[in-house]
Image (cartoon, rainbow, N blue to C red):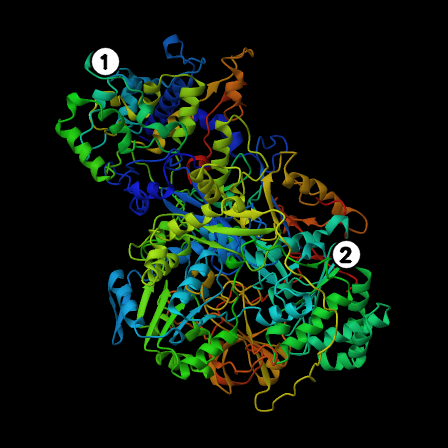
Amino acid sequence: MHSFLRFSFLLLGFFVAAISYAADAPPSDPSLLGVDGSAIDKAARARSDTGGSDFYTWWQKYFAESTTEVGPVVKQPIEFPHFRHAGDRDKGGMEINCMYCHTYARRSLVAGIPPVYKCIGCHQSIDEVRNKPRIKKLFEYWDAKKAIPWKKVNDIPDFVRFSHERHIQRFVFQLNRPVQQVCGYCHGDVKTLSVDRREHLLSMGFCVTCHEINHPVTAPGGTPIGNQDYWYSMRKPVEDSSGILKAQGPNDCSVCHK
Amino acid sequence: MSITTLFDNYSEFRHRHPDGDVPHNPYKWAMAIDLDACSGCNACSVACYAENNLPVVGKEKFAHGQVMHWMRIERYWDHDGSEFPERGARYLPMLCQQCEAAPCETVCPVGATNHTPDGLNSQIYNRCIGSRYCSSNCPYKVRYFNWYDYPTTDNVWPAEMNMQLNPDVTVRGKGVMEKCTFCIQRIRGAESDAKTQGRLVRDDGELQTACQQACPTSAISFGNLVDPESRVHKQWRAQQVDLDKHEQVKDQAEGGTDLRGYRIYEWLAPYPSIMYLERVRESEI
Amino acid sequence: MMNSEFDRRDFLKVLGWGGTAVALTGCGNGMVESGKETVVSYVEATDYMIPSVSVYFNSTCAQCDAGCSITGRIREGRVLKLEGNPKSAINRGKTCGLGQAGVQNHYNPDRIRAPLLRTGNTGEAITWEKAYALIDEKLKGVSGNQVAFLTGGMSGHTKVLLGNYMDSLGSKNHFVYEAIGPAVVRAANMKSYGVEMPRFNIDKARVVLSFGADFLGAWVSPVNFSQQYAQFRKGADGHQRGVLVQVESKMTITGANADRWLVVRPGTEGILALGIINVLNKLGVKVSGDIAAAVKAYDKDRVSKDTGVSAEQINKLATLLTERTPSLVLAGTAAEGYAHGSQNAAAINLLNHVLGNVGKTVEAAEVVPFPQMAPVTGNTVALQTLNDGLAAGKYKVLFSYGPNPVFTAPGAMKFKDNMAKADFKVVFAQYLDETALQADLVLPLDSPLEDWGTQVPEYMAGGAQINIQQPLMEKLHAETRGMGDILLTLIKQRRAAEYKPFDDYYGYLRAAVLQNKAALGGAHQPDNDIFWNETLSKGIIKFDGAKQASFSVNAGATGLNLPEPAEIDAQYPFHLIPHVNANLRDGRNTNQPWLQESPDPLTTIVWDSWIEIHPKKAAELGIQEGDIVEVTGKNGSLKVQAYLFPGIHPDAVSIPLGRGHDAMGRYAKGYGVNPFQILDVVYDKQTGELALHETRVKISKTGERVIVVKDEGPVGGNQEGQKIVPEMFTDKVNLSKEI
């Protein structure tokens, strides 16, 4: 009986190690390589698609922390349609860049909600919708000079320091990823929503999954992978057990815990 | 978290400090406090209260030793038997020394206190379970425990005092240990601003700890010890104090040293990151 | 920094959810659920209002009268922290603990939020319209000399406006009162140097000899002096490290930093000064005939007997002063404390002349070229005159703005009773302090962090400057007003036409500044708005090449007539020294909890009062630490815990000022005792100023004992043989390689 238990634990241990190792190994599928040659988190890939039926996704869903937990529907003072503003043109949207409204994302800890005058800036001249109920409500706020009491949808605990600036600077300005992909990684496909709804449980595990990716800086044998300056702008690459230099994002506790 | 990552990085997690073979790069935060300039005015202590959301505990709790001043000014007398203290008093600003080999880090049962790559001793409030082993180990006794729920039950910040709270610093609840962090919120802020501009933090006053910024006699220098241009680096060099020695070469010399720099409890080998400059008194009077 | 077309004030109005309402987001204790907290939301935002990014505005600290410039850190429309403004020549980017606590004065929960009208023993909240109408009504039929206006030190435009208001009332009864101001020193400086407050160049001195001037603590401009002190210790121009010698009867924080602290019999500082001149003369320093004659009788043995300072020390000190020049000699409590304080100060100032310091470390300060804005300083003679007038029933209407005389006036003056004799008393205050509680009408003030103003400091550090005070955030409470706005409304009751163009004090200030644009540094800037915004942004208006104040050198010893040391009164054997410490001062900031919890630098005691007794004397009386003793003087008694303190003359005891409030909010009320109440009313013979150290008391044990709440712990400042705070002497240390 004991030896059976011991054996099954051992098997389980191997399983876990194998899975986690597999998650770290550089993918052979080129579609899973980032612009700079790094591995995009396969799980992240799976999440941004509509499911995925591979074993890894199943594992994530049932054993690892579920990070696909969608938040509650939050009622906002005005039911702002993201799909109208940011949505694809062929779906009736205007493809406005996220940062046109959430303009502080590149220079602040928070992305920010636009002040009322941002909305008015356009809507004062859009006569076709001027008398629609939501627009009328918007102008009520403007005329009364009252700020719209938007409710916070993506909230993190007070003891966490999350900087939008750092992430936008890296992924949008340094790595030139498309804005919607960068914002969408954490906030989901907001352009298909009306008001925002939390897409992922913004837990520590969710953040750490990215921050702990070990990007190989050199291939076995010493060939450099990707832009070396870029790697060295992260935490200084360290050699792993097999002698390969790997670079990691910030994962010191004090970077995020204030 | 993957086990592979753990194995790969174990050597880093448990790296022996001080780390001569893996030098701090690009930042190692350190301080130098000039005790001849320090007048004992307590401005630094009040500034720390303002910056770090420190609770005022009141007379009764103060009497129990439950005061929360991360930075305290200790006052010593000469105790040389004379009737009057004719050489004045000796003031010592005492705060977390951010030891490289911190006795508090090794004993936390949950790993709430760790050493950061930039040489600070970090305290993670939400991980702390309140064992208080760390403060028991601290030789300087600079760790302070939240014995009470100051924000809510004790209502230390009634409206509108709560509007003064610094949003960059967690307001600690009951059962959590806290201590000076070298104003890590300011450090992270300055690092982030510098990074956006593609550079490192400079030693030109853009990053100051609250105590350093307030000190009316400019007794406190704070900065990056590995930046050769920083004032702190130059001071440590001039005083011939090495971070990773527990006995300085200059102190071993015949007849002692004529330099003022020293560290407190250096012989216990916690390798503190604060160098003090000895108080001076005029010999001709 | 602000060049947008938004006028600063419009911006603040338009914030809507900005300012106070916005401020409350994120203050909850960690609500992480989606949809529970609100987001920072604005109607219109200028380009520098970025959530989570701090904005910095400059203003002027008003916690004491030094006039340090501050920079406030503002996030989401609320001020969080104050720092010093590096551009100010006064504080050079630094703040003291008192300055830091300015935010606690602003956010204090015990602030008065609406005008209060007395009905019996309570105050009924009324509107400002009603309050102003009431004042107007009460002033009808009252002649100018029946109106009295009590303030603290004032300067800038508020002072001008008050002057004009008093003018409109036909009243000359503006009383400027400071409980602990250096009034005797000012008068003595006037006689010795021709100016009330010269500039002291501590950083250029090689030796500073201070007779009780606590310049690192609470004397005149402590932040400026502390900065200078740091340079003084480093040695100016490559010289040696400066030497500080402090002469006083009770150790102050400056004394605690001295190279040599000389304890002196209370009141005999002037004798010591003359003794030093005597020795200097013998050492070859040339003095004029009349000075030589004046000091002839003060040889070092006689002086040593009188003061308690050894002849050897006097010799050493004199020798040091001849070897290291220039030096600087300062008079502090030696002047303010005694009935012969002016004489003491004259003798001490004479030392500066004899040592040749005048023109080197004692210089004329620059002045602001607007004499009407220059500060009026306060003294206790003003309080006495007001008190006498109130006692005689002379004043029908009394206004009070700033001081708290019911708390700080000696009990023997019976100020509270005399104040009641005025028919109508209006107090302008932020808190219901002791004086406000006696008022008929209390008008709530804006805190200095939400108000406009200009300030001209009394002590001008390097170059003349006018300090700007501007709000660091929107008003916290809707029904408080700035003093400037109140004065403007009051003066409009009498001179409506003249002041009609000004909607509010902001408008008045702006118009006044723009009117003098060229003289205020705006000659190059044709656009008024840009000039105004730039001025606000800088927070300081500096004047290059401002004319030096008239400075004359009076090096004579005429009129110098020091009395013999006082006899010890057998019935009241101790001198009571009421101590002014940096944080509490005269009690105006005691309701700021950071200051209550900030340990006293000498005793480390918090939240309570204490009496310092020398250990030898305490042993004689059988007093231990924590014994509650009764301190009895001719005018009352106090019960206070004893603390054995080596830094005090055995014939003196000391109780700190500032505590002992029985009003002023939850953080001040009920903590400690108020030594002001039991002071003997003794005046300096020359100036008529209240002599603060002339109170004689006796001490008796009550039999009760408490544990003293202090930071130092039972070890009491003992290093226990460890190398915690070692020291080095100058003959062994090498300071040359330091940075």
Say which residue label 1 marks. A89
Find disc 2 in the rendering and name its residue.
Answer: C730
* Residue B95 visible, this orientation: no
In this rendering, the label closer to the viewer, 2 or 1? 1
Q: Is residue A146 left or right of residue C491?
A: left
Residue B85: horizontal and vertical position, in percent? Answer: 67, 69
Pointer 1 local density, CA inside 10 Å: few below 14, some 14–19, many at least 20? few
Q: Are marks 2 and 1 in contact (CB under 8 Å)?
A: no
C633 or C738, which lies in front?
C633
Check the image and report above or below for C246 versus C529.
Answer: below
Q: Position of residue B194 (x, y in %)?
A: 51, 31
Disc ID at residue C535: none
Q: How many marks?
A: 2
x and y, in percent, of residue C447 in the image: 39, 56
* Residue toward you, C345 or A229: C345
Q: Secondary structure at mark 2?
A: loop
